[in-house]
Image: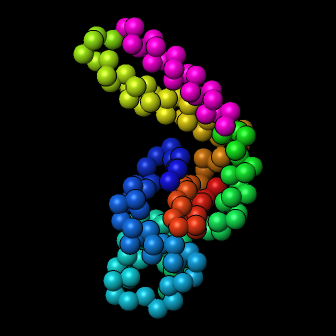
Amino acid sequence: MIDYLPTDRTYHGTLYTNRKLANILIRLASNKLTDPNDYDKEYIAELIKLGYAINNDGVIHVTIPVFTRSQIAALYELLNPITDDLLAISTKIKQMTDSILLNHVPGHLKEQVSGVSCMRMFNDIIGAVAINMVSKDYLKANWEPNEIPTFFSNRGISLITT
């Protein structure tokens, strides 16, 4: 799951920790939940509460478009050169950060250096990429009320918003 929200809209960890909720979302998105039972309806209500689905005059729609496995594979193929370059650059930055920190932190903190630099890398590298994408209008920051810019992949079906 990847998301970029300038303000909190929902907590995507909910889908990681609740497989049934994620599967109901995927079934809704692929129109495979035509006759929900009472338990399914409770999950649907939770998805609506979280903003992952909306009730339009009794018809439930997810707020995230669905892409097939082959469409996601095509997207990854398109992005692989970029992500490979980003990985190579961020690996060099992490090695330099670890080296600098190891030279300056007290001995009892040396075991934490790698974890600290990883957290910092996420903020600096991923955050910088997201800010750059917004500034170049590749990623929008003015979402409609029922949009959640996020990515969730589960068993070959992926859900993405732009």
Number of marks: 0
Left or right for 124, reference 38: right
Residue 138 among magenta residues: no
| Residue in front for this viewpoint, 42 or 19 | 19
Q: Residue furthest left?
A: 108
| Residue furthest top as drawn | 103
The answer to whether residue 144 of the structure is visible from this angle is no
Q: Residue at x 56, y 31 (%)?
A: 125
Q: Position of residue 80 (x, y in %)?
A: 70, 44
Q: Is residue 155 above or below residue 115?
A: below
- Of residues 135 and 17, which is closer to you in this image? 17
Q: Give the magenta-colored segment's residue range.
A: 84-104
Q: Which residue shows up at 48% across the image and 66% down it? A: 52
Q: Residue 146: horizontal and vertical position, in percent?
A: 54, 64
User: Does residue 15 appear anywhere in the picture?
Assistant: yes
Characterize the magenta stretch by its predominant secondary structure: helix
Q: Is residue 38 above or below residue 72?
A: below
Spot occupied by residue 145 in the image (x, y as percentages of width and height):
54, 61
Q: In the figure, residue 101 lies in which quadrant? A: top left
Residue at screen point 38% across, 83% down: 41
Residue at the image position 32 percent from the left and 24 percent from the top: 112
Compared across the picture, whether 161 is left or right of 124 comes to: right
Where residue 111 sits, quadrant-wise, is top left
Question: Looking at this view, is 76 or 44 the one in front?
Answer: 76
Give the farthest residue toward the bottom.
35
- 90 falls in the magenta region: yes
Q: State the colouring used for the structure image.
A: rainbow
Depicted 143 relative to depicted 130: above or below: below
Q: Quadrant of the C terminus?
A: bottom right
Percent position of residue 138, x then y: 70, 45
